[in-house]
Image: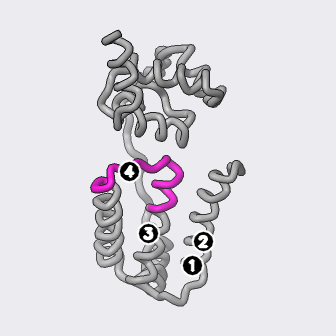
Amino acid sequence: MKATKRKNKLSSSGIGVRARRFMECNPTASPDEVATRFNTKKQYIYVLRSKMKKEGFVFSKEEEQQSAAGSAPLSIEMYDEPWQPPEMPPMPEVDETLDARAVEYGKFIEGAEVIQMLKRVVQNALNNRDKTLAHDQAESLDMILHKVGRIINGNPDVVDHWLDIAGYAQLVADRLNGRIR
C-alpha cells in the first residue's frame, strides 16, 4: 500500500507534471535529456513515458528508434597530419556589409547589450514562474527578442524586422495547431 501511495505521489509531483508537459511539447526529447533537465532518474522518465503511451500519446518514430538503438559508437576518421585552419583572404566585402548593417541595425556592441538584457528579463520571468518552453517556443522567443533589439537599437522603420517577428510567432502557432514547417 505504501509503495502505491509513493508512486502516485511521484506521478502528481511538480517534477512529474513539468516533465510530462515538456515531453508533450518535445516528443523527440530523449529520456536522458528529460531526466537531466528535471534532475530525476531515467527510470522515472521511462515510467512516465509508459503511462503517457498507455493514455494514447505517441512519441515520434525517430526518437523511439534512437532510444531503441541505444548509443551507437561514433566512427571517427583519423588523419596523419594535424588540422590547420585555412588562411583567411582579405575580405573587403565583410567590412562593407558590416558598415551597411550598422546603418540599419545600429552599432553591434550596443545592440548586443539591448538584446541580452531583453533575453535576461524573459529568462528570469520564466524561471520565477517555473515555466519551461518547448525548443521551438524558446528559439522563436529568442529570435523575436533579437528583432525587437534591432528595432530599439537601429532603424525601427525596416519592414523586415516586423515581418520576421510575425513569422517567428506564426511558426510556433502553426506547430501548436498541428502544422509543422
Mark linked to residue 146: 3
Callout 4 crowding tier (Cα within 10 Å): few <14, some 14–19, many ≥20: few
Callout 2 crowding tier (Cα within 10 Å): few <14, some 14–19, many ≥20: few
- Do tag 1 and tag 2 residues touch (Cβ < 8 Å)? yes
Residue 152 or residue 171, whichever sits in front: 171
Q: Circle 3 sits in a helix, a strand or a loop, which is it? A: helix
**Residue type, label 2:** Ala
Q: Quadrant of residue 33?
A: top left
Q: Is residue 66 above or below residue 147?
A: above
Main SS class of the magenta portion in the image: helix
Residue shown at 32% from the left, 26% from the top: 40
| Magenta stretch, residue numbers | 127-141
- Which numbered disc, 1 or 3, marks the residue that appears first in the sequence? 3
Mark linked to residue 166: 2
Colour approach in the figure: one colour
Q: Label 1, on which residue?
A: 162
133 drawn magenta: yes
Q: Circle 4 sits in a helix, a strand or a loop, which is it? A: loop
- Which numbered disc, 4 or 1, marks the residue that appears first in the sequence? 4
Q: Label 4, on which residue?
A: 131
Residue 165 or residue 82, whichever sits in front: 165
**Residue type, label 3:** His
Q: Quadrant of the N terminus?
A: top left
Callout 1 crowding tier (Cα within 10 Å): few <14, some 14–19, many ≥20: some
Label 4, label 1: how far apart the Cα atoms are: 27 Å
